[in-house]
Image: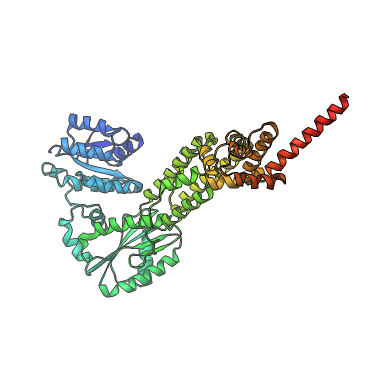
Amino acid sequence: MGEACKVLIVDDEMLIRQGIINYIDWEQEGFQIVGEASNGKEALQLIAEFSPHIVVTDIVMPIMDGIDLVREGKKAFPDTEFIVLSSFENFDYVRSTFQNGVADYILKPKLNGPELLKILNRVVSRIPDLQHCVSAVKPERSTEEILENMILGYDFSLDQTVLANALPNSGFALLDVQGKNLDPFQLKAGLQRLSLKELPVFALNSSETETVILLNFNRDQLDNIKRTIEQQAAETSDAAWMLFEPFDAIDDIKRVHDEGRMKMKKYMFYLPDANLFSYDNLPEENEKQDNFDLNHFIELFKDRLFNAAFTYLEDHVDYLAGRYNNDSFEFKSFLGNIVFNVIVLLDAMKYDTQELEEKKYGYFSAINEAKHAKEAFDQFNEFLEEVRTIMLVGDKANESNNLDKILGYIEQHYTEPLRLSEIANHFHFNASYLSSYFSTHHKEGFSEYLNRVRIKKSMELLENSTVSISNISGMVGYSEHSYFCKVFKRITGMSPGSYRKELQARHENEEKGLSSLKK
């Protein structure tokens, strides 16, 4: 008897490794377990030590995962064959491992003794020195297995005869169905029951949440297929159906599958409630518009034009939610970036952001993990509501303090050619916001209040000094004497000259009264 086929088992879960070891009688089947490893780094050391013919490895592992193990292992030990274990959730990873030289794969939910032995024998059949390990009857692959491997990018040249017999018609279409508790056999039977009885129909890469169905037809049958899919989709409203673009050559199956599935993921992210998408009747997306101007948003925020800032932001989020061909990562990244910038802005504007700082990573995580746009948007709206609350509480606490500071500033600078825009810049307000704020909290406008301050100061000068009226107008901040006189009369009811004369006459009368009392 020749050398046994040496096998190394790699998985970070000990129970999985033990399960694999106990699935079959290794020695009786011509195999020998030479070791176990819990990650890729340990596996590379054992490969160097024991030179296994085959490595059965998980994909997701700590320290070094299965993808890196395959890449590094094939580079250092090119004669070693690798079989990867994959859950349905990591199925996209499996495709990438084939580029690095994976010989085959096993889906964990399908992992059992016969399945494992079948895959092992298939891989051994490619190792010239170990043909004695292969069962007397070479295991044949089903059409579904061949098609599944083709979707993964596996070479199908040896299976062309099988495919030619199984796929007699000239046209092909892939149907991707996603939902909960899917039964691929029921889906396939449902299509055939409705009107596709005579067509070859294959359920591929099936799980409880996704099934890919290949339809082989002649071109004149395509309209009937579409109607049948519409009927079946109507009967299973809790699942999403997408018909990918038809193709003429079976070797295009991987390209059509990968491109169609990527598009379906985008549409399902933005339209989770829709249950039927067809390559020739996809929902229209929003027309392209200008990119979001973050600097403009920040300036609106700094100027305290909050309603305008939030309206601008929410309009753009609504626009993005209707751009179905954009990747979900782009949508989520935009929301996360706004969360970050708004917190920084609030902090710079002296709002209390402590609680928001503590929650921000929760918002980042919830947005990033959202399964569809509405879920991400709901989290984002929750964040914006909290921002509005913080601003409302902060503004109420600062209202009286801000007004006192503004009034004090006017008292100090009334002699200058004071303008509302200058005060707004000084206190980091928008000018229109400050005008409204001032009127609301002081019951008179800025200009009226400034005039009252200046006229009051001019009355003191008229009473307590001999400075000319024209000079007094300049001293209290008026550049035009005539305008000063006009304002003075409107507020006091008399001209500056009449006011001074009345004061002088009053003083003279008071002095005469005092003199008569002394006599």
Residue 405 or residue 117, whichever sits in front: 405
Placement of 437 over or under 176, stated as above or below: above
Query: In the rendered picture of this protein, how many numbered marks are placed on residues?
Result: 0
Percent across and percent down for residue 26 are 24, 39
Q: Quadrant of residue 516?
A: top right
Residue 26 in sight from this viewpoint? no
Quarter of the N terminus within the rendering:
top left
Residue 22 in sight from this viewpoint? yes
Asked if residue 183 lies left or right of residue 254, the reply is right
Percent across and percent down for residue 67 are 26, 40
Q: Residue furthest left?
A: 129
Percent across and percent down for residue 158 are 15, 56
Q: Residue at x 68, y 37 (%)?
A: 459
Percent across and percent down for residue 196 are 33, 71
Q: How is the image coloured?
A: rainbow
Quarter of the C terminus within the rendering:
top right
Q: Residue furthest front?
A: 519
Q: Quadrant of residue 167?
A: bottom left
Q: Residue furthest bottom?
A: 220
Q: Quadrant of residue 511?
A: top right
Q: Residue at x 24, y 59 (%)?
A: 253
Asked if residue 135 lies left or right of residue 14, the reply is left
